[in-house]
Amino acid sequence: MSLPPPSRTSPGPRRRTLFASAAGGVLAVVGAVGVSGCSGQPADGDSGSGGSPSAADRTRARAARDSLALLARYDAAIAAHRTLAARLRPLRAAVARHVTAFGGDQAKAAGTAKAPSSGSPSGSASTPVSGPASASASVSPSGSAGDTPETAKDALAGLAAAERELAARRTAALPDVPGELARLLASVAAAGAAHVFLLTETEGGR
């Protein structure tokens, strides 16, 4: 009596599910660090005299603006390509949590994607981001509804490029910031790397 050959397929979760779970775990760390960072800002180091913002304060504010600008890109992509909504909304929600973790505008982060004509999250988020990081519109998180590519494929590629550039920049900044903020930046950078995978994964790569 011969035994049936072992099955080659195992009922394991898809890779996208695994990466989404990993990103969720990172976001839990982000939330915890964000709370401790906000409640213990003096531990972040050199508060300037005379009310001047410290280097850590400036880095935190910049990170909040960058995440808010990235959020605007997600809103623009969802508004322009409704077929991407189910795929992008969980990532958008994660970026919104990044905004609040860095102490950014909670009202804007809590908004939802609207038609491009409303322009509320997109137009207001892109303006504050300045400096070398926003020099290249193709990879900068500071996009707007008018910059959204015409095809869904290009929209995903643009979001992935923005996430990748921002994660790399935050990782590079880690040696220059104090402990709590460094941990927060590292956690958000890791979440961004997971987002890049989810944005670039094809339907066949499960």
Image (cartoon, helix red, strand yellow):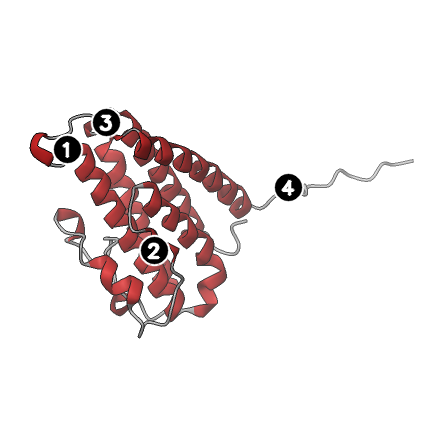
Of the image marks 1 and 2, the number of the one nearer the N terminus: 1
Quarter of the view holding residue 118: bottom left
Q: Amino acid at mark 1?
A: Ser
Disc 2: CA contacts within 10 A as few (<14), some (14-19) or many (>=20): few
- Contact (CB < 8 A) between labels 1 and 2? no
Residue drawn 14% across the image and 53% down it: 135
Q: Which residue is mark 3?
A: 42
**Residue 156 pos. (x, y %):** 38, 59
Q: Is residue 198 left or right of residue 72?
A: right
The mark closer to the camera, 3 or 1, is 3
Q: Amino acid at mark 4?
A: Gly
Which residue is labeled 2 in the image?
A: 107
Give the labeled residue for mark 4. 12
Quarter holding the N terminus is top right
Q: CA distance from mark 4 to mark 3?
A: 46 Å
Which element is circle 1 on? loop
Asked if disc 4 and disc 3 are in contact, CB closer than 8 Å, the reply is no
Which of marks 4 and 1 precedes in the sequence?
Answer: 4
Measured as percent of width and height from the top left, residue 127 is found at 18, 58
Rounded to the nearest angstrom, the CA distance separating label 1 from label 4 is 48 Å
